[in-house]
Image (tube, helix red, strand yellow):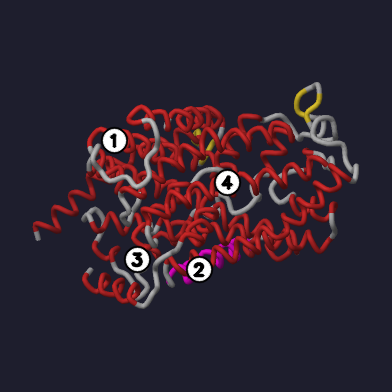
Amino acid sequence: MALGRVGLGRARAAGGGKMRLLPLIAATYFMVAGGPYGLEDVIGMAGYGRALLLLLVIPVVWSLPTSLMVGELASAIPEEGGYYRWVRRAMGEFWGFQEAWLSLAASVFDMAIYPTIFVLYLGRIEPAWTAGYRGTGWALAVVVVCMVWNLRGARAVGEGSVGLFCVLLSPFVVLSAVGLWKGLIGGGGHGMLGGAGGVGAGGVGAGAAGVDFAGAVSVTLWNYMGWDNASTVAQEVEEPQRNYPRAMLSATGLVALTYVLPLAAVALVGIPAARFSTGAWTDAARELVGPWLALCVVLGGMINGGGMFNALMMSYTRVPYALAEEGLLPEVMERKNRWGVPWVSLAVCSVGWALALRLSFERLISIDLVLYGGALMLEFVALVVLRVKEPGLARPFRVPGGVWGAVGMGVGPGVLIAFALWAARGERVAGLPALEFAGIVATAGPVVYLAARMVRKGRLGG
């Protein structure tokens, strides 16, 4: 433990480990969105009109309250471990552990999605490259490369995210500009409200693959979740009290903008919504501009999968480290390298994520939403409890409205999480309903907590 802290001190003295505002914004962007990739299923399920409505409404009801909550708590309690520390401080060790358990359990299913996206887009270049076990091999390569990258510290991940952000979005700048030009000025396409994939008098247009509004809401929520993830590296961020609120609000605007513009562009030129499923941005780019842009979109999709995995790896691996500091995980999880990275936690988490790589994309989303939703609601409860319990706590950024304002922040996300639970009622995982499977994982939290306390008691007794 002492050696790890000395190593962290050396890293900071050398100028490493501290993320500034711009890298924090970029890392947060990748933790939440990573570009328009993932929206294709929303378009295919709901049609353009309803998809656009979801992308405009959900940020107001879901993203904004969550980012405001994170802005207040991260600036008031800028500690390594982020949301785990907030809930523990507000409601005690038991609930803090449940917050960590739900978040880490959700990460097993969430993190497996991003290497899958990388492989899906790689297969668009040459299907033979990802056939059979080759696809799993590429997904494992993503895990290994990101683990090595993360070993260089939070600053390396944040600064790398800035570069990846620029490269990833470049094709969509071209696609959006061409699509909007053709749709609004060039007269190409039929527009959103009566064209091949639009919403006409009969609701979702004839081009929609099938009306699945509940599924579209769930996928949209997944595309807008993860605002709290950046909080876990608070001690590795420069001026966290000042930079977290700014990063949250800036990233909220960026995510909404980079989702809405490409969708509006392809809708205005009349590309049928029925043609949209995971990976369909490639075909849209080829049709609107040409093969060279399609290839750029494919490469961007690979960056999306790798970039999101890389940023989230940085976030999640700080939670076992924080638990180990409290004695709730083995002391070895506290070990850090010269850049201040908890490398044992990094390695253990990477193995867990690799084991979930073979699960399907749809099943991963439903389980992820259930577990993440439980953790998120604990954070909103912590926001309210700390307002009552510690009214004098220094809050450089404060959600307006006093205690009732804090209560109101959790209403919209709570309703949407309840809707996601209802929407997932038909999903099955390992022969069980998805909700039952997620419930078993969640209820294992108290059992694991009791086991962790017994281990800690034995360690202290020895």
216 lies above or below 19: above
Quarter of the image where the C terminus is located: bottom left
Amino acid at the residue labelled 4 = Gly
Mark 3 or 1: the one toward you:
1
Q: Residue at label 2?
A: 144
Give the residue at mark 3. Answer: 342
Q: Quadrant of the N terminus?
A: bottom left
Q: Percent x, y for residue 271?
A: 82, 42
Of pointers 4 and 1, the one earlier in the residue sequence: 4
Please state which of the two labelled residues, at mark 4 or mark 3, is closer to the viewer: 4
Q: Determine which residue is flagged by label 1.
A: 387
Outermost residue toward the top in this view: 201
Give how far apart the Cα atoms at labels 4 and 2 are: 32 Å
Label 4 and label 1: CA atoms lie apart by 27 Å
Label 3 – label 1 distance at C-alpha:
32 Å
* For residue 352, above or below residue 340: above
Label 3 packing within 10 angstroms: few (<14), some (14-19), many (20+):
many
What percent of the width, then of the height, locates residue 386?
27, 38
**Residue 16 image label:** none
Residue 43 appears left or right of 327: right
Side of 321 where 214 appears, left or right: right
Residue at position x 25%, y 38% in the image = 91
Left or right: residue 134 versus residue 127 is left
Lower position in the chain sequence, tag 4 or tag 3: 4
Question: Upstream in the sequence, badge 1 or badge 2?
Answer: 2
**Neighbours of disc 1 within 10 Å: few (<14), some (14-19), many (20+):** some
- Is residue 157 placed above or below 417 in the rendered structure? below
